[in-house]
Amino acid sequence: MNQLRVFKELYYESPLTKKELAETTDLSTPTVAKALSGLISRELVNEKGRRDIPTGRKPITYGLNNTSIYGLGVDLEIPDLRIALYDLSRRKIASKGTYVDLDDLQERPVPHLTDKLNHELQGLIYHEGLDESSIVGAGIAASGVVQEGSFRPFSRFESPSDIELKGPLEDKLGFPTSFGNDVDLQLLSELDRLGPIEDPGHVALYFSARLSGKRQPTVRIGGSIAIGGELFLGGEGSAGEFGHMSISSAGNSRTPETKCGNTNCLESFVNDELSDSDGFAVPKSVVDAIQQNIKDLVFAFSPSLIIVDLDAFPEITGQVMEELEVFTDGLKETMGLDKVEIREPLDKDRSVTRGAVINYFNKSLLDPKEFSTLMRS
């Protein structure tokens, strides 16, 4: 589909001229012009002005019409709930944060979540003065093991079960949805900002420590893996659960209880240590455990990039990253490991909702069948 090829180019880079689009899509200029005409009539693309050139007539440039359609991003960081609206360029238009009732959620999870999400979305639409029909779909980010349409928040409840949300949520909202793990979608947002990765052997790791809950804050530790610019989800979609890897209990007088089923997992260990601390400083045992976990990941994956997102512990971020720099530099001599880039996220504003929208756009707007449906609507 020529229109989709042109749309994809503008989705990742714009504005572009007809000549530039012809070069990047390997289509003729007349074919590009015809495709642009269809996209403009559907109001997905519009003119962005003329390109300055040294001589001759200045060519018209084209880009996405960012006021035509929007996507909803949802972060189910239970008990926290965040929603945000994004335009086609993945720019945030509006957002809102709230909480869900854990008792009600565990008793009737699907009705509670669908009603809550619909209520918050209607409020956001009203506040921004948007036409509800301009929202074409929603990307949902959830914790734990996430399949397409369901998730199992195994570290949130005592007796977790799969929450089948896709069908009821689409019935309530009136538009399609996609689902993904929250940290996977954080990494997806980062990859979108980095641009295309050409090396198929490029490995990116995302290590996340987030604070969840208002009355009883809990640290949630997760992770994600991308190979060659594509998320690696594993056979059941649970790859990258770094927070539930078992750690050494040396120096710890007891083994904390876990909800994930593993013994002495990192997330449980960290929260157990924090509960015994004075609350004024992050215990050294927590810093050491996080550093060791990431070091183990370096040996396991030989990454090109490690993104360290210690949103729960901003005061130790510099210390952890400096130690990792020293560690990976040492591996260049002992193992011949290439230089590992270690940095914080490019998007400091918790990019989960943005990644959720990108996940939806990738599975809908950039899918030939779904794109055809959009063009006919």
Image: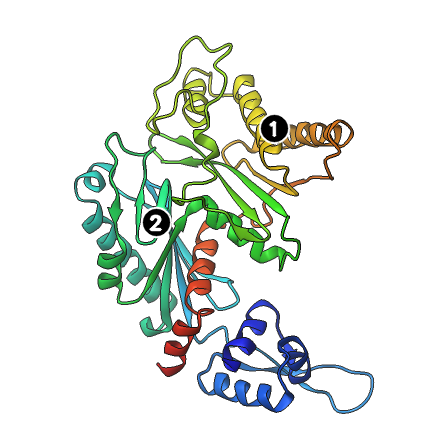
In the picture shown, does residue 109 fall above or below 244?
below
Res. 240 mark: none
Q: Nearer the N terminus, badge 1 or badge 2?
A: 2
Q: Residues within 10 Å of mark 2 (few under 14, many from 20)?
A: some
Q: Residue at x 72, y 35 (%)?
A: 337
- Tell me what residue is drawn at x 42 percent, y 61 percent: 360
Residue carrying label 2? 147
Q: Determine the image quadrant of residue 344.
A: top right
**Colour logic:** rainbow
Amino acid type at image mark 1: Lys
Q: Which residue is mark 1?
A: 295
Residue 349: x percent and y percent? 52, 49
Vertical side of 210 occupied by 365: above or below: below
**Residue 340 locus on image (x, y percent):** 69, 39
Q: Nearer the viewer, residue 88 or 377?
A: 377
- Where's residue 377, x and y in %? 35, 81
Q: Position of residue 200 (x, y in %)?
A: 63, 53
Type of amino acid under label 2: Gln
101 relative to 16, above or below: above
* Residue positioned 68% across, 84% down in the render: 19
Asked if the residue under mark 2 is in contact with the one under mark 1, i.e. CB atoms within 8 Å, the reply is: no
In three-dimensional space, the C-alpha distance between marks 1 and 2, rounded to whole angstroms, equals 29 Å
- Crowd band around label 1 with a 10 angstrom C-alpha radius: few (<14), some (14–19), many (20+): some
Q: Secondary structure at mark 2?
A: strand
